[in-house]
Image: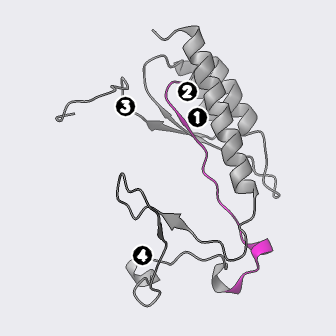
Amino acid sequence: MKSPHHLFTAEITFALVLLLFRDAIAQPQQEGAAVRTNGGNAGSSGASGYSCDPAVCQLANNCHCASKDPPNGLSPQDTPQFVTITFDDSIQPSLMDTAKQILNVTNPNGCSAKGTWFTSMQYTDFSLVQQWYSSGNEIADHTFTHVGDPSEGE
C-alpha cells in the first residue's frame, strides 16, 4: 500500500501540473508564433517546424491544417474553445476534493465544467466513483490493477 506521504506528494504534483496547464492555456498565442514538434521521432534532439499542405489535408480526408483563424469566418470572440480535463489513477477523498476545486467553474452560458477520470481499481473508493459519475462526469478504464510493466500478452 502507498504511504500517506506518497499520496500527499501525488496530490501536490497533480495540482501543480494543473496550475501550470491553466496558466499556459490562459495565455493567448502570439501573432506569428509557430507550432513546434519533434517530428514524431522519440528521442529526437531537435525540433522541426510544423507544416501542413492544405491542398492535401482536406476535411474529406478527415484532415484540417492547424490555424489561428477560426473556421467559416467566425470571429475569435464567437468561437468556442474546448478544454478536456482528465484525472488519472485511483479516486480517493483528498484527490476528489482537488478535482472538484479544479472543476468549480462554469462557461459563460452557465454550464459547469466536467472531467474524465481514468481510474484503476487499486486504492479506489468506489462510492466516490458513483458520486463522480452521478455528477455528470465520465469514468474511464486505466487498467484494473495499474501494472507498471505489463507482459507482452497483456
**Residue at position x 43%, y 91% in the image:** 55
Residue 113 showing in the rendered view? no
Residue 39, quarter of picture: bottom left
Q: What is the distance, in whole Å, between disc 4 and disc 1 at their CAs?
A: 31 Å
Q: Along the horizontal axis of the image, is 135 left or right of 125?
A: right
Q: Amino acid at mark 1?
A: Tyr
Give the x, y percent position of residue 116.
56, 41
Using the image, determine if residue 122 lies above or below residue 153: above
Q: What is the distance, in whole Å, between disc 1 and disc 3 at their CAs?
A: 18 Å
Earlier in the chain: of badge 1 and badge 3, it is 1
Using the image, determine if residue 154 lies above or below residue 26: above
**Residue at position x 81%, y 52% in the image:** 110
- Which label number is shown at residue 62? 4
Q: Amino acid at mark 4?
A: Asn
Span highlighted in magenta in the image: 73-90
Q: Amino acid at mark 2?
A: Val
Q: Amino acid at mark 3?
A: Thr
